[in-house]
Image: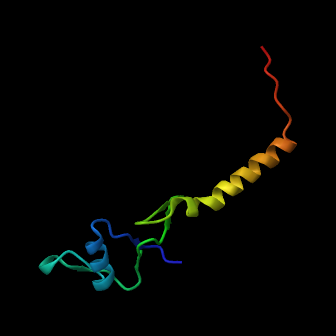
Amino acid sequence: MQKTEIIPIGHEDYQRRVQDTRSTGEGDNQEQIPENMHIVKEGEPVQILGAWVGNGIDQEHVWAPMIEKLTTLSVNGKRVAPQSKDVN
């Protein structure tokens, strides 16, 4: 698993150019992206601190497994947890 993920932000032409050239900037301001750094493609989700980010990703698709897991935990928890009563 690679630690550094490059997510090109900006116009689609810029994103494609970063992918194709592995560099940012233009002319004398170009900075090469090392080969050991992954450049995220259009539609490829990346998980950063628990959140899924990226250009053109399907948010519903990437979050569906987590929502399903939480729903299952919630349903199972209701079956085993005693009901609390409001004591005033």
Please state which of residues 14 and 87 is positioned toward the viewer in this rendering.
14
Q: Position of residue 4 (x, y in %)?
A: 43, 73
In the image: residue 2, left or right of residue 24:
right
Q: Position of residue 76 (x, y in %)?
A: 81, 49
Q: Is residue 41 above or below residue 10?
A: below
Please state which of residues 58 and 83 is positioned toward the viewer in this rendering.
58
In the image: residue 43, left or right of residue 66:
left
Q: Position of residue 34 (x, y in %)?
A: 34, 83
Q: Is residue 66 above or below residue 83?
A: below
Q: Give the image's coloring scheme.
A: rainbow
Q: Position of residue 64 (x, y in %)?
A: 62, 59
Q: Which residue is at a point 84% across and 32% down the rendered structure image?
A: 83
For the C terminus, the quadrant is top right
Q: Quadrant of residue 33?
A: bottom left
For the N terminus, the quadrant is bottom right
In the image: residue 5, left or right of residue 25:
right
In the image: residue 44, left or right of residue 26:
right
